[in-house]
Amino acid sequence: FSTGPLLFFGIITEDIPQVIITFLIDYKYGGAGFSSWAIINLMTSVYDALIKLAEAYDELDDMHDTGIRMNTYNGHKDQITHIAKLDNKTFLTASRDAVVKMWDVASGKCLESFVHDIKVTAVAVIPGKKSFLTGSCDNSIRLWNIAQPGDHSRTFYGHERTVTSLKMVNTSMFISGSEDKTAKLWHIKTGECMRSFRGHTESVTSICILGSNKFVTGSADGTAKLWNYSGSIMKSFKKNWCINTFIGHTMGVSSVANNNGVTFLTGSNDNTVKLWDTETGECLKTFFGHSACVTSVARLDTTTFISGSGDCTIKLWDMETGECLRNYNGHKKYVTTVVRRDENTFISGSGDRTAKLWAITTDISLKHIKKQDIEEG
């Protein structure tokens, strides 16, 4: 919400009438001509009006620069760690309060809560299924059925430290990352760990699937790595599945996101985002603008992406020019995660315990989403 229009209204209703009344009183009771008091008062009033006009224009300019916040989702008792889109009407939030919540996008209501034993650090939805996975500080991964929120249906054991990231390969396999410095490939139906990927020297913080049997891991060691999980060589005795290592960040990599299968994005604690070429290993572009660590990156379309940061903001970027197109302000603490919802909106999570729905442009409103939900229903 911008206060610019209110400032304009205040100038019209307060400052201008004040100047007129001052001169009328001085003209009637001050004798011939205008007194020095009236002139001083005029100058003061004009100065105040100019200041307010400048502030009003500033606010209106900010309204165009800052994205529109459409809804806020309150209910968690600790920071939100991850968000996953469930379908067009609902999404999931994972939190350090040991709860995963399912939200109705349009109404902002919490539809269901899934209670874990300990802090939930990752969540991933199984495509085409009414189920999802959670990772936790107890080193385990759990499979949940949305229709049965009271309990989970399977637990996957294998990591030695906190599970930090979960990504679906398809409906039957997923990859997990952990503070134990490894990534693991799992089979959902059997619960089997099919492969462990070792090579990072610090925690694996984030994972993205590229397709063509490849995925990328980001790590607190400051690098990203490209891996192969091809089924054709799954049963071989090859120990190192790493295809390439991407070096360039000066601090840990906190987030990775697929761009187009050939390039990908990394967000880092060095406050930057980088775009990489998987084939050459080259850093194609570096995006500067955040004043604190970049905690999350997400591709929106072929030319734009968003980044969340410890500076409490989210930025919309032009991938080709490197320009920051828009700032999204509203979270009171660091942004922990950003997720694309559809071509018009995205969702963010924060250390302020809330999730927020944002319009990518100013042309979309919550009424549009509610109408869309009615038509789909």
Image (tube, rainbow, N blue to C red):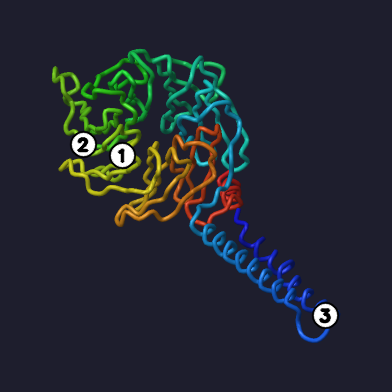
Left or right: 61, with 137 as reference point: right
Q: Residue at label 1?
A: 266
What amino acid is labelled 3 in the image? Gly
Left or right: 278, with 27 as reference point: left
What amino acid is labelled 2 in the image? Phe
Residue sitting at 31 percent across and 26 percent down?
204
Q: Position of residue 11 (x, y in %)?
A: 68, 67
Nearer the observer, 34 or 334: 34
Verify CB contact (< 8 Å) between mark 2 and mark 1.
yes
- Closer mark to the observer between disc 1 and disc 3: 3
Q: Earlier in the sequence, mark 1 or mark 3?
A: 3
Q: Earlier in the sequence, mark 3 or mark 2?
A: 3
Q: Earlier in the sequence, mark 2 or mark 1?
A: 2
Q: Label 3's element? A: loop
Cα gap from disc 3 to disc 2, whole angstroms = 79 Å
In this view, 304 is above or below 166: below
